[in-house]
Amino acid sequence: MGTAASSTFNADTLKRGVEGHTAADLLSLYADDAQVRIVDRNTQPSKPRLLHGRDEIGALFEDIYSRDMTHRVDQCIVQGDHAAYSQSCEYADGTRVLAESMITLRDGKIAEEILIQAWDE
């Protein structure tokens, strides 16, 4: 079990990271050994996409933040060493993405994240 989150992580910090304009803004919230599990239409629950460590997570964020799109945190709840948040994104062409994440914090950084996303097709 992780320790309670320090004051370095809160809803405002997450909002600034997600809604920032660089991958580095968001990646700074993750522990060096963080793990992210992604479930969507292409990577379903029995075979999710697994990212291990800041290098793999950072590569994903670099790809995402290189796109012409906006990101918005709709809701965020932080309680102890857990947080959950909703995120909506929109590409310049109007395509929308909705994501829900449950995260585990360790020492004020994201240690684990389960992300479920859906997008317009």
Image: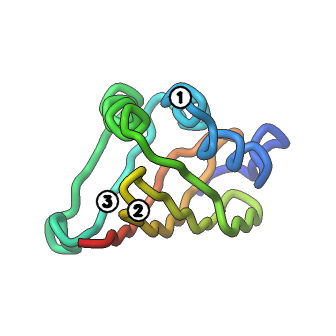
Rendered residue at 59%/45% (across/down):
18
- Residue 107 or 119: which is nearer the viewer? 119
Looking at the figure, which quarter contains the N terminus? bottom right
Q: Quadrant of residue 62?
A: top left
How far apart are the two marked residues, 2 and 3, measured between alpha carbons?
23 Å
Q: Amino acid at mark 3?
A: Ile
Q: Is residue 1 left or right of residue 79?
A: left
Q: Is residue 25 left or right of residue 56?
A: right
Q: Position of residue 20 (x, y in %)?
A: 62, 36
Q: Position of residue 61 (x, y in %)?
A: 40, 36
Label 2: few (<14), some or many (≥20) within 10 Å?
A: few
How far apart are the two marked residues, 2 and 1, measured between alpha carbons?
21 Å
Whether residues under marks 2 and 3 lie with C-beta atoms below 8 angstroms apart, the answer is: no
Label 3: few (<14), some or many (≥20) within 10 Å?
A: many
Q: Which residue is mark 1?
A: 22
Q: Which residue is mark 3?
A: 38
Q: Quadrant of residue 96?
A: bottom left
Rendered residue at 76%/66% (across/down):
79
Rendered residue at 60%/30% (across/down):
25
Res. 94 mark? 2
Question: Mark 2 vs mark 3: which is more N-terminal?
Answer: 3
Q: Amino acid at mark 1?
A: Thr
How far apart are the two marked residues, 3 and 1, measured between alpha carbons?
20 Å
Q: Nearer the viewer, mark 2 or mark 3?
A: 2
Is 79 above or below relative to 81? below
